[in-house]
Image (spheres, grey):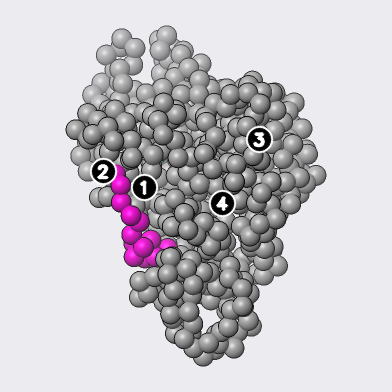
């Protein structure tokens, strides 16, 4: 059986979820403690960001040992207890596999540096580097010891890209996945997995920092088929998702069409660049609704037509909170949070909830650069100043764009540090926690709306399986789509603006049933007024 399309995934950034030891860092036991909360929400799978041994240069995405637990987060016994207890709550685990690169502190890299040729071939070493730019800024190549060669690091200088062309590397990677499978894990999220397949000859390319030369190469699909066959493809059920950086629909269909036996589904990020000026992240711009709507429609229909499958999300550990980006959060936090939720949970794909989203958490609103810790933000800060921006301008950009925005401690209650830790948190809690916290929100509209959305997906094949059709494509304010299955239809209307919008409702839908709305007392009339950030789903059977 392939994965279950009725399932909903909840993402936990372990470092920031719940600290049970008082060391300021969240831990596996903290997640065990919160399983009843997650069961109450109704999620089926929890994706955990990396908790393996790591120098934490990139918060665990710089792995120095793939098959152990970083003592910062607990022990292997804690992990096993978490996996077992989660099952009792009807929850499966999804682990983060960072197979494109490893930490330069990993013994493979250390042996390579010491001259071991077997391990040198684990990395991408060249006499002459290309002109590629690292995704975290600066040159993507660094001197490999004093050999005169350079090693490739698409991310931080301490994250060395692995050479998947080497069969020994592939074997090691398969072993990693199988190690966790033997512990009962059936869910895997593969970090930047469309970058693993590098060509033999690497070419200069000044466009897009060189990305076209190393992204979605044809051989990448071969490696995914091999990984599938050698590991998770042997399981019943389970769920795999690949993070696809700078990708396109054609490749994503290929990665996720079940006939290809690569992955169950893909993340893409195009819809999260609609507030980038000229495609550049470190800029300030109001989001472009037209672009967002068009992207949702093109991807929704394209993936549907090619029998591909998308992971649906607005938030994750790399993104500022969607409420701050797409909604007038000061005036309409609840309406905005529920509308955004409906716009993906009723769509075609698997919805992902990022911790805190279910209570409408917002960016922390730090007032000093000293509060930020992420390597990407710190690099960007220096680069923006060096490019001549003023300190104020630069800080405003970091405030809006930093990945730390989503990594702040989960807000449990109004006690110090948002009830996350009794020690000093590794990252300061957001300013909003006295009001926005689980204790306050659990019986509130946002949390209960998420519960309903999760339940509806389980009950209605129309939601979990139906095809996706764009609707009201010309609207300047409404993002709408239809789902269709076996003669049944669902129309989902989402007002992305803080004002009333009137639309013409087709005659058949005027006789439909309101399945869900974030406003009460909806009447289905020909001239239908959608209130600020209203979401409305109309069912016809
Ligand atoms: O992110 C991949 C990625 O492309 C990021 O650069 C992302 O676009 C960026 O963070 C947005 O600002 C993955 C992980 O999700 C991220 O946390 C890691 O830092 C990165 O891979 C390297 O492993």
Tag of residue 300:
none
**Would residue 375 appear left or right of 4 to someone viewing this image?**
left
Q: Nearer the viewer, mark 3 or mark 4?
A: 3
Task: Say which residue label 1 marks.
Answer: 246
Which residue is depicted at the point 76% across and 45% down?
A: 36
Which mark lies nearer to you, 2 or 4? Answer: 4
Per the image, the residue denoted by label 2 is: 208
Which residue is the extreme one toward the right? 88
CA gap between label 2 and label 1 equals 10 Å
Q: Secondary structure at mark 1?
A: loop
The residue located at (53%, 76%) in the rendering is 491
Percent coordinates x, y for residue 512 in the rendering: 60, 84
Q: Which residues are magenta?
A: 283-296
Q: Are there few (<14), some (14-19), or many (20+) residues within 10 Å of tag 1?
A: some
Q: Quadrant of the C terminus?
A: bottom right
Q: CA distance from mark 3 to mark 4?
A: 18 Å
Task: Look at the numbered discs 2 and 3 and tell me whether their residues touch, using CB distance below 8 Å.
Answer: no
Q: Residue at x 44, y 85 (%)?
A: 504
Residue labelled with disc 4? 360
Q: From the viewer's perspective, is the residue at label 2 or at label 3 nearer?
A: 3
Circles 2 and 4, Cβ within 8 Å, touching? The answer is no
Mark 1 vs mark 3: in front: 3
**In what element is the residue under mark 3?**
loop
Residue 34, visible in the rendered structure: yes
Helix, strand or loop status at disc 2: helix
Label pair 2/1, CB-CB below 8 angstroms = yes
Q: Which residue is mark 3?
A: 415
Q: Earlier in the sequence, mark 3 or mark 4?
A: 4
């Amino acid at each position: 059986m392939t994965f279950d399309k009725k399932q909903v995934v909840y993402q936990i950034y372990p470092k920031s979820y719940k600290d049970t030891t008082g060391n300021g860092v969240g831990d596996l036991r903290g997640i065990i403690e919160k399983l009843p909360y997650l069961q109450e929400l109704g999620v089926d799978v929890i994706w955990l960001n990396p908790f393996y041994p790591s120098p934490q240069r990139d918060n665990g995405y710089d792995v120095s040992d793939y098959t152990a637990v970083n003592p910062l987060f607990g022990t292997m016994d804690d992990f096993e207890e978490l996996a077992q207890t989660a099952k009792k709550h009807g929850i499966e685990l999804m682990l983060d596999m960072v197979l494109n690169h490893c930490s330069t502190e990993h013994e493979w890299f250390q042996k390579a540096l010491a001259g071991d040729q077997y391990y040198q071939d684990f990395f991408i070493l060249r006499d002459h580097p290309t002109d590629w730019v690292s995704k975290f800024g600066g040159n993507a190549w660094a001197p490999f010891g004093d050999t005169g060669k350079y090693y490739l690091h698409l991310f931080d200088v301490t994250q060395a890209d692995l050479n998947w062309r080497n069969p020994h590397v592939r074997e090691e990677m398969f072993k990693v996945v199988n190690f966790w499978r033997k512990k009962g894990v059936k869910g895997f999220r593969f970090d930047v997995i469309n970058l693993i397949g590098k060509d033999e000859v690497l070419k200069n390319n000044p466009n897009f920092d060189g990305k076209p030369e190393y992204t979605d190469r044809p051989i990448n699909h071969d490696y995914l088929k091999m990984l599938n066959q050698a590991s998770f493809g042997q399981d019943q059920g389970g769920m795999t998702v690949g993070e696809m950086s700078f990708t396109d629909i054609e490749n994503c269909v290929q990665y996720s069409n079940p006939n290809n036996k690569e992955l169950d589904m893909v993340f893409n990020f195009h819809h999260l660049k609609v507030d980038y000026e000229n495609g550049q992240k470190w800029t300030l711009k109001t989001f472009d609704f037209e672009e967002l709507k068009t992207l949702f429609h093109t991807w929704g229909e394209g993936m549907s037509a090619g029998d591909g499958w998308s992971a649906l999300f607005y938030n994750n550990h790399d993104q500022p909170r969607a409420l701050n980006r797409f909604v007038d959060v000061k005036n309409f936090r609840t309406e905005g949070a529920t509308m955004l939720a409906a716009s993906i949970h009723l769509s075609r794909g698997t919805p992902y909830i990022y911790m805190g989203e279910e209570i409408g958490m917002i960016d922390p609103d730090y007032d000093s650069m000293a509060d930020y810790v992420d390597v990407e933000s710190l690099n960007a800060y220096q680069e923006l100043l060096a490019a001549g921006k003023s300190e104020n301008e630069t800080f405003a950009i970091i405030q809006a764009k930093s990945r730390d925005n989503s990594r702040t401690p989960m807000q449990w209650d109004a006690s110090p540090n948002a009830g996350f830790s009794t020690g000093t948190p590794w990252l300061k809690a957001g300013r909003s926690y006295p009001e926005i916290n689980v204790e306050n929100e659990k019986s509130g509209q946002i949390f209960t709306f998420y519960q309903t959305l999760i339940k509806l997906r389980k009950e209605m094949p129309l939601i979990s399986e139906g095809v996706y059709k764009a609707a009201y494509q010309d609207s300047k304010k409404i993002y709408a789509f239809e789902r269709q299955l076996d003669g049944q239809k669902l129309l989902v209307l989402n007002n992305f603006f803080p004002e009333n919008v009137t639309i013409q409702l087709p005659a058949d839908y005027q006789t439909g049933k309101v399945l869900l709305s974030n406003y009460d007392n909806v009447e289905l009339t020909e001239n239908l007024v959608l209130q600020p950030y209203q979401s409305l789903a109309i069912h016809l059977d």
